[in-house]
Image (cartoon, rainbow, N blue to C red):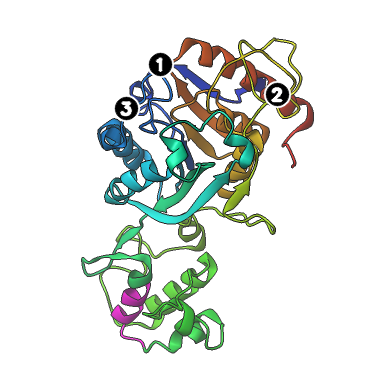
Amino acid sequence: MTKKNGKKLYNLFHGNVSEKYSEWASPDLIISDGAYGVRGFNGDVTDVSDLNEWYKPHLLEWSKKAKPSTSLWFWNTEIGWATMHPYLEATGWEFVQLAIWNKGLAHIAGNVNGKTIRQLPVVTEVSALYRRKIFLNSGDGETLGVKEWLRHEWCRSGLPLYKANEATGLKNAATRKYLTKDWHWYWPSGESVEKMANYCNKYGKSTNIPYFSLDGKNKVNAKSWDKLRAVWHHKNGITNVWSRPPLANAERLKGTMRRSAPRVYKPTKYSAAHLNQKPLDLMIEQVRSTTNPGDIVWEPFGGLASASVASVLLGRYPYVAEIDDNFVQLAEERLSEASIEFNEKGIFSD
């Protein structure tokens, strides 16, 4: 396992991920590419109706180990994702948006038969973005969402709402954006929340529990507030539809990767391997947009570990698990190559 400054750049487990969840560090991002309900790999279920039972133990572990700021990319078919959406929400995940991988007309060849010819050919796969639902305890014992909590804590102080503008130094903005009840609400910066907390605790009515306290003992500060929010790095020109042909020829791995293989993001031809290998450029975009350098990324159903390879190249630290012997060997090769590249050149730039 390649290291940088004595530190391992990835953690690859050969076996069932359920054996390792309790040992893994809490994730900043989870990229799930598990069962689809199409029996596409050894261990997949035969129908989408079985997906809930397949994912149930994993959803419970993800929710247990996730941070308030953890994001989740959930890959599946359209009906597979739709089937799992209620269970994701029930275990504390809030839907953000659906990204669609459009594989194009080339994906149709070889995938049309007597059954599918009587419907529109399917050339898509989806990846749904979720974030943790955040609930905070107020000073008088209520459990509220972030938007409701902010307004509640200000009102608890007994101060008029318009004073929030004075507290933050934002003329007619704090009250209108941060303390509103309607859809105009904005997530405030840590600096603004800290200023509101200081103002309420200085000028508000006497209280045993500080206003705007996350732990019931201390008023919130900017750093602790900003840690609650999920990461998002926007990049102009990228939408929720990813038009990208399915992997073939040079990029698609087939068989055991050679030790002398070129760098993973400049692949060459190999012999045969995985039916649903994800393009590395899509994985890089998912990791880049929802994490910071040094963050922890989980890939519980590793396959060829494409998300983990992307994570290493981007300076994140991945935890990945895979049961299949051959896939583990290929994953180890790819991760080792990514580590060499990172050690030589630093964070990959696309």
User: Foreground: 87 or 254?
Assistant: 254
Residue with the mark numbered 1: 15
Residue with the mark numbered 2: 249
Q: Up-down: is 114 above or below 2?
A: below
The secondary structure that most of the magenta stretch takes on is helix
Identity of the amino acid at label 2? Asn
Crowding near the residue tagged with mark 3, few <14, some 14–19, many ≥20 C-alpha atoms within 10 Å: some
Helix, strand or loop under label 1: loop
Q: Is residue 329 left or right of residue 45?
A: right
Residue at image position (65%, 38%) is 245
Image location (x, y in percent) of residue 331: 57, 19
Residue at image position (51%, 58%) is 223
Report how far apart the C-alphas of labels 1 and 2 lie in the structure.
Answer: 30 Å
Q: Quadrant of residue 102?
A: top right
Identity of the amino acid at label 3? Thr
Q: Which residues are magenta?
A: 150-159
Which quadrant of the rendered structure holds the N terminus?
Answer: top right
Helix, strand or loop under label 3: loop
Residue at image position (58%, 52%) is 241
